[in-house]
Amino acid sequence: MALDTSADAPIPVAKVSTLIGGWVDRLGAVWVEGQITQLSRRPGAGVVFMTLRDPSEDVSITVTCFRSVFDPVADVVAEGARVVVHAKPEWYAARGTLSLRAAEIRPVGLGELLARLEQLKRRLAGEGLFAADRKRPLPFLPQCVGLVTGRASAAERDVLENARHRWPAVRFEVRNVAVQGTSAVAQVVAAVRELDEHPEVDVIIVARGGGSVEDLLPFSDEQLVRTVAAARTPVVSAIGHEPDQPLLDFVADLRASTPTDAAKRVVPDVGEELARISQLRDRARHAVRSRVEREQAGLAATLSRPVLAAPLRMVDDRAAEAVALLGRARRCLGHQLDRASSDLEHTLARVLALSPAATLQRGYAVLQRPDGSVVRSAAEVSAGDALHARVAEGGFTVAVTESD
């Protein structure tokens, strides 16, 4: 319940601590799983002190128990061991500290660990974190490789030496972390996130040498698996040896059997690439040469044909045909013109023969009245009429003396 306090009416520290203790006492016992990071068994003391830490988070709590509770598991429980504790929260009012009073301690055996990992594996697989379509291809030639590994470890040496031997120009961003123990998960997760945000890192390698199942447990942690699944940069898992398969192998974009294998898979071999380039050049040169030779052969075959051997022959033949046709056309036109000229001459002769002028030439005359009309009958004129007589060469006026 909230207390009615103020700056003028505060309550003592002891009362606050007592009230907190009362609230804590009302809490029931719980089963807690964690990893023992500190273990204190003082000779002759009836109480054992432990620090129990969450393997995935930077959170720990003090656990106390009587020797009668700890002695049954003393031979199998040590610092670094995973345990399940049945304990009740306990408040120490004099110092204002919270701890767990353990009534039972159960070591987590290898079989149980593997069973839990299998359950976690099925759950994460059900969420699609291990699906093949999520995995991204590695860049062919990464300019900068992020490496998460133990400080001065054999895994670090194997990755760096093999990668630089294969491609001397490759650069590394190395993050040295704890690869086992209570702080391993937090450090590896932080390193992966930092490298994933690095603008120059093209691929990330998480590498560790071999070890026992317990040593490799940090690389099966759910938080690490989800961090790798959410990463935008391709991640390569190189944990342990070929038989070792932590959950990181399943979520990573590529699983390498060893750190050395990771170096070989991430960067190409400069010698192999130069040999491949040489082969491609030879293939290209051969292809171009074959194409040129094929085209030359085709051109030679084309040039050997009669039409190209004497290219003007067809033109000459067509020119002769054109000359012959032109001659025929001229002859035909000449004949037609000759016939037309002859016809015209005959027609002209007939026209001239039948024309009035020709009639006048034969001695005839045309009589016209003063108005220009032609006299066709003697009855049309009377004595005394003046008429104009038109002859072949000129004309003259005549007078009618009488008409019959």
Image (cartoon, rainbow, N blue to C red):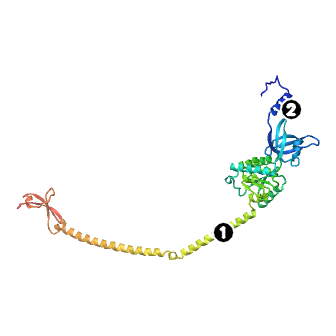
- The spot of residue 243 in percent (x, y) is 78, 58
Q: Nearer the viewer, residue 150 or 73?
A: 73
Q: Is residue 149 visible?
A: no
Q: Quadrant of the N terminus?
A: top right
Q: State left or right for residue 244 relative to residue 398.
A: right
Q: State left or right for residue 68 relative to residue 401.
A: right
Q: Residue furthest right?
A: 44
- Depth-wise, is mark 2 or mark 1 nearer the camera? 2
- The spot of residue 63 in percent (x, y) is 85, 40
Q: Quadrant of the C terminus?
A: bottom left
Residue 93 numbered mark, or none? 2
Residue 285 numbered mark, or none? 1
In the rendered structure, which amino acid carries the disc numbered 1? Arg
The first of marks 2 and 1 along the sequence is 2
- The spot of residue 158 in percent (x, y) is 81, 58
In the rendered structure, which amino acid carries the disc numbered 2? Ala
- Dot 1: element: helix
Q: State left or right for residue 2 relative to residue 366.
A: right
In the figure, 200 relative to 62: above or below?
A: below
Q: Real-space Cα distance between discs 2 and 1?
A: 88 Å
| Residue drawn at 30 percent across, 73 percent down | 338
Q: Are marks 2 and 1 in contact (CB under 8 Å)?
A: no
Q: Nearer the viewer, residue 337 or 108?
A: 108
Q: Nearer the viewer, residue 252 or 158?
A: 252
In the figure, 394 relative to 2: above or below?
A: below
**Mark 1, other Cα within 10 Å: few <14 / some 14–19 / many ≥20:** few
